Image (tube, rainbow, N blue to C red):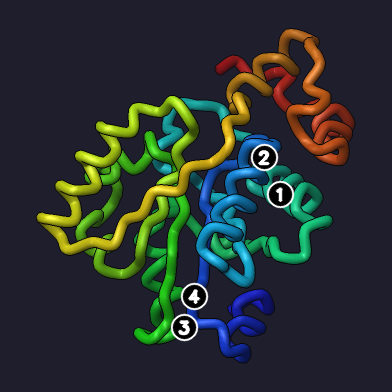
Amino acid sequence: MEKVFEKIKDSNTKRIAIMGGTFDPIHFGHLAAAENVRKLYGFDSIIFMPSGDPPHKIGISVSSAEDRYVMVQMATASNPYFKVSRMEIDRVGKTYTVDTIKELRVFWGDEAEIFFITGSDALLEIMTWKNPTELLSLCSLIAVARPGYKIEALKNKISELKKNYQSDIRIAKVASINISSTVIRNRVRSNLPIKYMVPECVESYIYKNNLYIDDKL
């Protein structure tokens, strides 16, 4: 198991927050959301978990796992509360959240509180994930919602999941930063600036490695 997890296991920390995502690329919206969640729920750290071979991206061009991992590392380096894990990008085959949480649950034990941070849109589709009922039994979920989001639909979905599966799902309202990875990729491909949308180090990495130039989707 990675050093980042070994360190947590050896500490008194019992509440672990995992922020999963493709991060193609990671941007200020991701970073702001993670910091908001950390402060709101008092986590000692947020562990960023770049996906390896994301099953929901079939037919969509995705940058290499290593490129995405390096960008996440660079983007989070200045925040001492942010950690980065290679667990999913080192796993062979499709990477599913439930498999990751199962592995972490075995490692940390039943006494640990494991929280998985996800976007509100993703939570609305959670029953399409692999083994969703098992996932809901293994960890708590935090749905990040921006101001103006269709909050009632989200609350209704959470109520339904809590009633049917006794799941622990919480909403974290964060400041609105209207940035998306798709928009960033499109701007790079269209030779438009992405400055102030991503950390400067990520911007430099994208241009240096010609990422998204030949991306057709």
Q: Which residue is mark 1?
A: 72
Q: Amino acid at mark 1?
A: Val
Q: Calculate the distance from the C-alpha at mark 4 to the C-alpha at mark 1.
A: 22 Å
Q: Secondary structure at mark 3?
A: helix
- Of the 4 image quadrants, the one containing the N terminus is bottom right
Q: Amino acid at mark 2?
A: Ile
How many numbered callouts?
4
Q: Judge from the rendering whether residue 45 lies leftward or rightward of residue 196; answer left or right.
A: left
Q: Judge from the rendering whether residue 8 lies leftward or rightward of residue 78; answer left or right.
A: left
| Nearer-N-terminus badge (3/1) | 1
Q: Amino acid at mark 3?
A: Phe
Q: Judge from the rendering whether residue 94 lies leftward or rightward of residue 78; answer left or right.
A: left
Q: Which residue is mark 2?
A: 26
- How crowded pointer 1 is (Cα within 10 Å; few <14, some 14-19, many 20+) is rated as many
Q: Which residue is mark 4?
A: 15
Please tell me in which quadrant of the rendered image residue 23 appears: top right
Q: Looking at the picture, does residue 7 appear above or below residue 178?
A: below
Q: Judge from the rendering whether residue 168 lies leftward or rightward of residue 189; answer left or right.
A: left
Kindly indicate whether the residue at mark 2 contacts the one at mark 3 (C-beta within 8 angstroms).
no
Dot label at residue 27: none
Q: Nearer the viewer, residue 174 or 121?
A: 174
Q: Which residue is mark 3?
A: 107
> x and y percent of residue 28 in the render?
70, 37
